[in-house]
Amino acid sequence: MTSQPTTRHYALEGLNFFMADVQAGIGPFLGVFLLARDWQPQAIGTVMTLGALTANSPETVIDALLIGVDLGPNLSITGSLATILWLAAIRREGEEVSFMQFSRIGVIVMLPALVLALGARLIAGH
């Protein structure tokens, strides 16, 4: 039998969501940093994987990564390969979109999507 989630539980899961997004951003930096210190690629991957798994429960990590990877690129024009390819295509057509224009619209789109995704997750009982 599972107990009802508390407000503290929801706050912790919200923190895990943002930690997953930060971890996704810091991963490439950490990889290059450790590689420059003569770490082997296998050791770097192991450290990064173990860090993610020991810091959070696997279920919460999976949910947070799915939401963060899906919504995170809406905030940065370089957030995903698809966005970079889209930017290159519209520039070929003579259009220009600045980082601020993209981010402004990304926030407008991402915030309601985030609320809906977290709401669906809470309703599902995770």
Image (cartoon, rainbow, N blue to C red):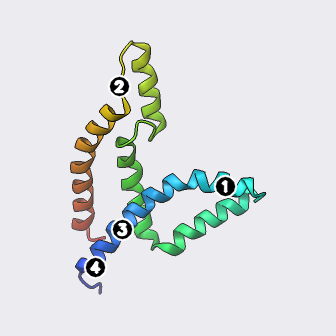
Give the labeled residue for mark 3. Answer: 15
Q: Is mark 3 on a helix, strand or loop?
A: helix
* Residue under pointer 4: 8
- Residue denoted by label 2: 97
Q: Nearer the viewer, mark 4 or mark 1?
A: 1
Question: Disc 4 and disc 2: Cα gap in Å?
Answer: 41 Å
Evaluate if marks 3 and 4 touch, with contact meaning CB atoms under 8 Å apart. no
Q: Give the Cα distance between marks 1 and 2.
A: 32 Å
Residue 63 x, y percent position in the rendering? 38, 62
Q: What element carries label 2?
A: loop
The residue beneath circle 1 is 33
Q: Is 95 drawn above or below residue 82 in the view shown?
A: above
Separation (CA) of disc 3 from disc 2: 32 Å
Q: How far apart are marks 4 and 1 (CA)?
A: 35 Å
Residue 14 on image: x %, y %: 32, 66
Question: Which badge, 4 or 2, comes first in the chain's sequence?
Answer: 4
In the foreground, 5 or 20: 20
Mark earlier in primary sequence (3, 2): 3
First in sequence: mark 1 vs mark 3: 3
Q: Nearer the viewer, mark 1 or mark 3?
A: 1
Q: Position of residue 125 (x, y in %)?
A: 26, 71
Q: Is mark 1 on a helix, strand or loop?
A: helix
* Residue type pointed to by label 1: Phe
Q: How far apart are marks 3 and 4 (CA)?
A: 11 Å
The amino acid on which the numbered mark 3 sits, given as a three-letter code, is Leu
Nearest-to-viewer mark from 4 and 2: 2
Horizontal side of 29 relative to 124 (left or right) equals right
